[in-house]
Amino acid sequence: MAKTYTCLDVGVDCTWSTSGETEDEVVTNIGEHAAEVHPDVELTPELMAAVRGVIKDA
């Protein structure tokens, strides 16, 4: 089952979304997006745990 995520899911004022076949694929996409669009956001282990917690089944 595909997985989905949007920045809005963790309270970031950004409508970007992504999907992938696995959670790891979605997390990779998130990391690439964050580096490009949100370079001021540090992807701490705590933030990544919150991100993983809101990834949804499509």
Image (spheres, helix red, strand yellow):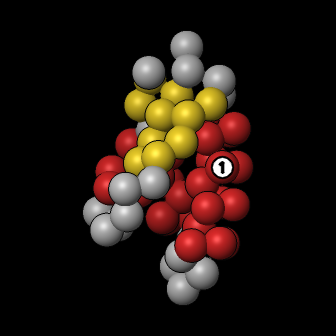
Name the spot of residue 19 as percent of width and height, x first. 56, 34
Q: Reply above or below: 38 against 3.
A: below
Q: Secondary structure at mark 1?
A: helix
Name the image quarter holding the N terminus. top right
Residue 28 falls left or right of residue 47: right
Q: Say which of 45 and 19 sits in front.
A: 19
Q: Quadrant of residue 2?
A: top right
- What residue is drawn where x is 59% and y is 67%? 34
**Whether residue 10 can be seen here:** no
Q: Reply above or below: 57 against 15.
A: above
- What residue is drawn where x is 54% and y is 76%? 38
Q: Quadrant of residue 5?
A: top left
Q: Residues within 10 Å of mark 1 (few under 14, many from 20)?
A: some
Q: Quick one: which residue is furthest to the front in this view?
A: 15
Name the image quarter holding the C terminus. top left
Residue 22 falls left or right of residue 49: right
Name the spot of residue 18 as percent of width and height, x first. 53, 42
Q: Quadrant of residue 23?
A: top right
Q: Quick one: which residue is furthest to the top in this view?
A: 1
Q: Quick one: which residue is furthest to the bottom in this view?
A: 40
Residue under label 1, please give it.
29
Residue type pointed to by label 1: Asn
Residue 16 falls left or right of residue 15: right
Q: How many marks?
A: 1
**Whether residue 28 can be seen here:** yes
- What residue is drawn where x is 39% and y is 43%? 54
